[in-house]
Amino acid sequence: QDQLVESGGGLVQAGGSLRLSCAASGRTFSDYAMGWFRQIPGKEREFVAAISWSGGRISYADSVKGRFTISRDNATNTVSLQMNSRNREGTAVHYCAAHQQGTSIWQYWGQGTQVTVSS
């Protein structure tokens, strides 16, 4: 069964750091673009960051540029998101996602991991 499983969520103080990980299993996701999204209750899910299959192309939402870093390890089928929180805006459920390179539809989603930023 193809699945993505996030880990590393929890409580972090504003100004602190947290690292999320996403483990992919089932198919080989090394030829898939991977990304992170987040959703605040009552709001739509929003894009955070994405990385191409090779790691050669990376994009970030403007709100996290310079504070978040996405990376991947195709040998272990994992993608990570290093987050340096600024304020409580980072409180959200964070989701890992994947889509086959060459497409633009995110095909696979994890169940999400809660990140809570305290002031």
Image (cartoon, helix red, strand yellow):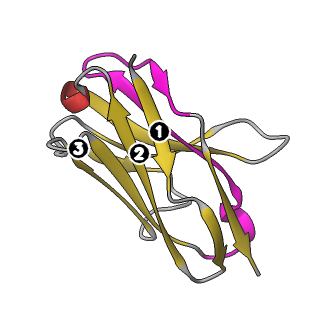
Q: Which residue is label 1 attached to?
A: 5
Residue 42 location, x and y as percent? 85, 40
Q: Residue at x 73, y 35 (%)?
A: 44
- Element at label 3: loop
* CA neighbours of label 3 inside 10 A, class few (<14), some (14 to 19), many (20+): few
Residue 22 location, x and y as percent? 41, 45
Q: At label 3, which amino acid type do we have?
A: Arg
Q: Is residue 101 found left or right of 49 in the rendered image?
A: left
Q: Which residues are magenta?
A: 86-110
Q: Are marks 1 and 2 in contact (CB under 8 Å)?
A: yes
Judge whether residue 79 can be spotted in this image: yes
Corner quadrant of residue 4: top left
Count the marks: how many? Answer: 3
Corner quadrant of residue 81: bottom left
Q: Is residue 91 magenta?
A: yes
Residue 98 location, x and y as percent? 39, 29
Q: At label 2, which amino acid type do we have?
A: Cys
Q: Which residue is label 3 attached to?
A: 57
Quadrant where the N terminus sits is top left
Among numbered discs 3 and 1, the one appearing first in the sequence: 1
- Element at label 1: strand
Q: Which residue is label 2 attached to?
A: 22
Q: Nearer the viewer, residue 47 or 98?
A: 98
Q: Is residue 92 magenta?
A: yes
Dot in front, 3 or 2: 2
Q: Is residue 60 found left or right of 40 in the rendered image?
A: left
20 relative to 30, above or below: below
Q: At label 1, which amino acid type do we have?
A: Val
Q: Are marks 3 and 2 in contact (CB under 8 Å)?
A: no
Q: Residue at x 56, y 81 (%)?
A: 16
Dot in front, 3 or 1: 1
